[in-house]
Image (cartoon, grey):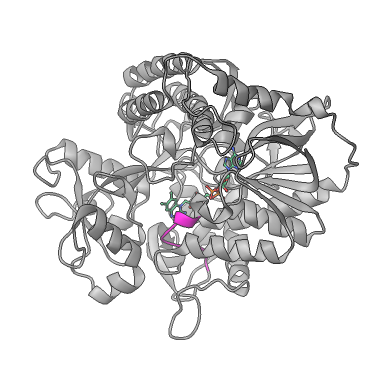
Amino acid sequence: MAHIHDVLIVGAGGAGLTAALFAAKNGANVGVISKLYPTRSHTGAAQGGISAALGNVEEDRWEWHMYDTVKGGDYLTDQDAAEVFAKETIEGVIELEHMGLPFDRLPSGKIAQRRFGGHTRNFGEAPVRRAAYAADRTGHVILHTLHQQAIKHGITFYNEFYVLDLLFDEDGRAFGVLAYELATGEVHAFKAGAIVIASGGYGRVFKITATAHTVTGDMQALIYNKGLPLEDPEFFQFHPTGLFPLGILITEGARGEGGILRNANGERFMERYAPTIKDLAPRDVVARSMFIEIMEGRGCGPNKDHICLDLTHLEPEVIEKRLPDIAEFARTYAGVDPVKEPIPVLYTAHYSMGGIPTTLWTEVVRDEKNTVVPGLYAAGESACVSMHGANRLGTNSLAELIVFGRRAGIASAKFAQTYKPHPLPPEVVEPGRERVEKILNGSGDESVARIRKALQESMMENASVYRNEERLSKQVKIIRELQERYEHISIQDKGRIYNTELVEALELGSLLTVAEALVHAALNRTESRGAHAREDYPERDDDNWLKHTLAYREAPGKVRFAYKPVVLGRFEPKPRTY
Ligand SMILES: Cc1cc2nc3c(=O)[nH]c(=O)nc-3n(C[C@H](O)[C@H](O)[C@H](O)COP(=O)(O)OP(=O)(O)OC[C@H]3O[C@@H](n4cnc5c(N)ncnc54)[C@H](O)[C@@H]3O)c2cc1C
């Protein structure tokens, strides 16, 4: 079956739905494909807030937001992207409000704003209230608001369709995708004037993670397997406060509301590592400080293996009203009442800064000269417009979805006008069918669950908060072995209809592919910057490494690197202290 749209969007999270809305508003006939029902996308799990220099509580300026974003990214941030972002998120948040999004309010009726890590006033002077929020369910309300708007605008949804392949014509123009429909087992062909990838991140490469089971980097893996590059895949963020030991997220908003991290001695140790903004330092800084506290024997609990997040000095009303979900998580999953005792926390895999490289208008590029792949766009966590550089600030991701999702919608709708649909031959679906059949017919003795577990555990051990050559080299070998084992998997459900085991097998293939890019790039980058901390190269090295990685897959296990200059601008790279 073939479906034709002007603009086709892969992904129904915040980025995909924003792109869909704006493409539709710009006259395009839009289709959205999603492996999940849209409101189950990971955006719905976002808790703490969305950043914009609205200045509702105290003075704020987009220039300060831009500065924080550039410094937060350890100067690997492209400054043109950070500027577009800091300016356009202001309008974006107000637009969400006009769509009916139920933000928390100030007594004056304006949108309330809270503090978040790395967001400061006057270029680093003190924390500023910049995050708009709806209790600790900000992503949930964003996703529902956008979904309702998309329905209102007559957008066609293909829910529970798993994208298997991207189609390009001889001139390299992207013109379609192939997708497996869970409900029927059928492989469908989709044709479009422009395609927007908005498929989210790949937090599931690690064992301890705050991301949903479905965050598996499928489209990044497809792009990489097609010979297109991934940008900066070595930069992966660990969020400091996952609920110990499960890794469920405890929003940074808890510290934004006044929460304090303490070690076993009850000491507020962040005063030593970031004297100016303390517990509200960026995530990479806080995660490493916690690691050091634990390594030096000051971890909490009988095994001294975690840190305490103390909210007991806050008014109970603040906890119940502004942080209701995380309070419930602590009670349910850790048996701890945050009103009375500190919450046990440890870093948890959270966000992929790297991804599919794009221009400021979200066009996918194929090389360091920014040569555009015609018809292909990417936005949100799957993309790398490089506004986060080496480390993302909290609340900048939801804002990115709104800013660059909007740009993707506008640009793709315009490009789609250059396209004349003509029918697809029925055999076009064959490569997709082959991928499915290969897994269904597999009769080897390897299991998906075992390989996934081995990948996630080894990634945690060898490629997480601190890295070095020895462990990364070991991980390169482990991934290659796991990829070989993956060739011999078999699944028990041989049925074609609603085969979730098949989908999990496909997702494992994606995880192995993106993990390969991550680990090779991490081994290649011999410096420490942002979230990439090398024990054997502890300093940032601007002379040699103030540049973006482009990783190309030459063959399984063989990666080639090219480099793209960082777009500098008004903020000179400086040592990063807080
Ligand atoms: C627990 C948690 C809390 C967070 N809190 C915040 C916060 O407070 N503030 C903030 O700024 N950021 C936060 N983040 C980060 C932010 O939520 C994410 O980066 C962002 O929501 C990603 O949005 P997205 O639209 O790019 O992708 P997602 O929301 O992940 O959506 C991806 C979409 O792609 C589809 N898809 C993927 N692969 C395929 C395929 N093969 N075929 C078909 N469809 C596919 C999925 O069905 C889904 O619809 C948080 C993240 C987590 C995990």
Q: Position of residue 473 (x, y in %)?
A: 38, 16
Is residue 568 found inside the magenta-colored segment of the image? Answer: no
Residue that appears at 37% across and 24% down: 450
Q: Position of residue 480 (x, y in %)?
A: 45, 15
Q: Is residue 492 left or right of residue 374?
A: left
Between 7 and 236, which is closer to the camera in this rendering? 7
Say if residue 373 shows up in the picture: yes
Residue found farthest to the bottom: 108
Residue that appears at 83% across and 46% down: 416
Q: Position of residue 365 (x, y in %)?
A: 69, 34
Q: Examine the rendered structure and indicate whether residue 430 appears above or below residue 68.
A: above
Q: Main secondary structure of the magenta part?
A: loop
Between 108 and 182, which is closer to the camera in this rendering? 182
Q: Is residue 425 left or right of residue 228?
A: right
Is residue 47 found inside the magenta-colored segment of the image? Answer: yes
Picture quadrant where residue 117 is located: bottom left
Q: Examine the rendered structure and indicate whether residue 89 appears above or below residue 409.
A: below
Q: Position of residue 128 (x, y in %)?
A: 41, 66
Picture quadrant where residue 161 is located: top right
Residue that appears at 77% across and 48% down: 7
Q: Examine the rendered structure and indicate whether residue 142 appears above or below residue 543.
A: below
Between 32 and 117, which is closer to the camera in this rendering? 32
Q: Is residue 518 left or right of residue 469?
A: right
- In the rendered image, the quadrant that contains the N terminus is top right
Which segment did they paint magenta?
A: 44-53
